[in-house]
Image (cartoon, grey):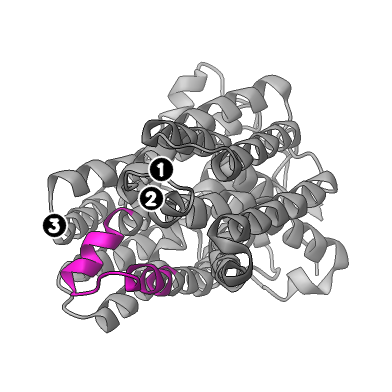
Amino acid sequence: MKPLSTLEPLPPNRSILSQLLQLPVLVAALGYLVDMYDLFLFSVVRVPSLKGLGIDGDQLLSKGILLLNAQMAGMLIGGIFWGILGDKRGRLSVLFGSILLYSLANIANGFITSLDQYVLLRFIAGIGLAGELGAGITLVTEILPKEIRGYGTTLVATMGVLGAILAYFIADLFNWRISYFIGGGMGLILLILRVNILESGIFTRSRQRVLPRGNVLMLFSSRSRLRKYIQCILVGLPIWFVVGILITFSPELGKALGLTEPVAAGKAVMLSFSGQVLGDIVSGFLSQYLKSRKKVIRLFMLLSLAFMLVYLLVPLTDLTLFYAVCVCLGFANGYWTLFVTIAAELFGTNLRATVATTVPNFVRGATIPLSALFVQLKPGLGTVYSALVVGLLTIALALAALTYLDETFTKDLDYVEEV
């Protein structure tokens, strides 16, 4: 790894707030808001949209898993595509291209008349949704001084989670088709704001050198790089176990847990992401205070474990208490952006977008094997204990991976990965 140049000092006469409110940071944050709105709108409207297509009863779970897996498969493919593009052509090309694709796909979602169309469009939307977070985090970490980049990524995360909450309220006010139209429309409007954004200076300087950019094979050509990459993915697994299984399928789990009142999936999503807003803010500021990403991530993982055990093992017969635990699970998920930030900080600028884009999408895509394992264990262990086994596995893998990752809080990002 070789440095490109010395990192520019904190510009004089510019406050922290003024740097956080500069246009690239704000647009990255608003882009992630629209991204999360569209991504989690499906979790909110899963049941009414499937019923609108004539699907009901036991098929709601199986067809819901099919659609979720189609979306996640698209995100796996999109993560690779957008990540490579971000390192080869620049972070802004991803911010423009990804939002255009998922905006158009989500508008098309409002016109579907069959399950096959729904599956195809969730797959296409997944490809588009894959690029926003990684490109945004990469851009923010590269344009802000290392002393405050944690605040920048916290702002992006907080706006993103607010997008998930917005999805709940929009779906509550409008039917599911209109909700998809609104998400796609917000994305197209956001494209106008991105016209005057400049590329990251670190990336611009790296293009002056002849070196491989966005070469995925470089992740496999070095044992240390591959180890770091896999560890980054494992660290994020508990977040998407909670989102993809405990929250998305909370109606089915609530019934298995003995709740007499039905759980509203949309409300569970909204409440968990309300908790995550607070978790993102607390984890970001705590990381800045402790000057450590790893300590805060470990703390939030242990909180996630505790609330998982409460959710699955404590007899919560009251629906209000169940929803309160959903809020707590969301709060414990508040290390999402810290985990993506670590991934970006661990790799040089010629691989940074590739890593920062693919890692969160491989974590999201891990919903496929996690849900498959959940379904496979369900006949023998039952709904609750199959979820418990999968949850404990993700926590164990994440804690082990985090232990061996380097601390990146003070790391200078102005360097490249050598072949």
Mark with earlier residue (1, 2): 2
Q: Residue at x 74, y 62 (%)?
A: 230
Q: Which mark is residue 178?
A: 3
Q: Is 45 placed above or below 197 here?
A: below
Q: Is 238 placed above or below 277 here?
A: below
Q: Which residue type does callout 2 highlight?
A: Met
Check if mark 1's residue and mark 2's residue have beta carbons within 8 Å.
yes
Q: Which residue type does callout 1 highlight?
A: Gly
| SS under mark 2 | helix
Whether residue 229 is visible, yes or no, is yes
Q: Which mark is residue 36?
A: 2
Q: CA distance from mark 1 to mark 2?
A: 5 Å
In which quadrant of the rendered image does the C terminus lie?
Answer: bottom right
x and y percent of residue 73 in the render?
Answer: 49, 74
Whether residue 410 appears in magenta in the rendering, the answer is no
Quadrant of the image occupied by residue 241: bottom right
The residue tagged 1 is 160
